[in-house]
Amino acid sequence: MTWYAIALLVIIFGLAGMLWYQVYGMVKLDAKSRGLKRPRLWGYFASSADSGLLLYLLGRRNYVSTMNEADQAEMEGRKKQALWLVVLLVAATVLLLAAMML
């Protein structure tokens, strides 16, 4: 591997960690607004388990969200950051694949 492939791998792992944190934050904020017990645990479970996010999305249907304006603004900010992180992850992965073919 060349130095730029290693650098791209480091960037990809960093972006993936940042995306994990954004998903954790969004789920924690949503669970807190719905009154679920242990929102931090739900955030961790939904962002790290294979089917955790699906289980969270299915389980939260039974609770009504009471998110205030500040929390809604924070959620929108986290969504935008997560979208940009996904775009950057895809771009870095394409660059890594192109670098591996050289």
Image (tube, grey):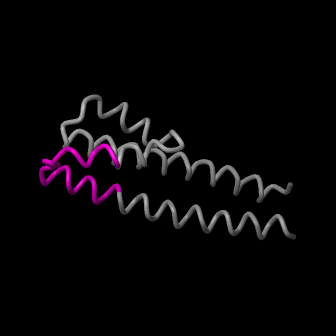
Quarter holding the C terminus is bottom right
Q: In the displayed structure, would residue 6 be above or below residue 63?
A: below
Left or right of 73, for residue 16 = right
Chief SS of the magenta region: helix
Q: Compare residues 42 and 60 and report the one nearer the observer.
A: 60
Could you tell me residue 43's position as x and y percent? 38, 39
**Residue depicted at 37% across the width and 63% down the height:** 80
Left or right of 91, for residue 61 = left
As for residue 24 lying within the magenta part, the answer is no
Bounds of the magenta segment: 58-78
**Which quadrant of the structure image shows residue 63?**
top left
**Which quadrant of the structure image shows residue 21?**
top left
Q: Compare residues 11 and 67 and report the one nearer the observer.
A: 67
Could you tell me residue 59's position as x and y percent? 31, 43
**Residue depicted at 43% across the width and 46% down the height:** 53
**Residue depicted at 54% across the width and 43% down the height:** 50
**Residue depicted at 86% across the width and 54% down the height:** 1
Q: Compare residues 41 and 97 and report the one nearer the observer.
A: 41
Could you tell me residue 65's position as x and y percent? 17, 49
Could you tell me residue 67's position as x and y percent? 15, 49
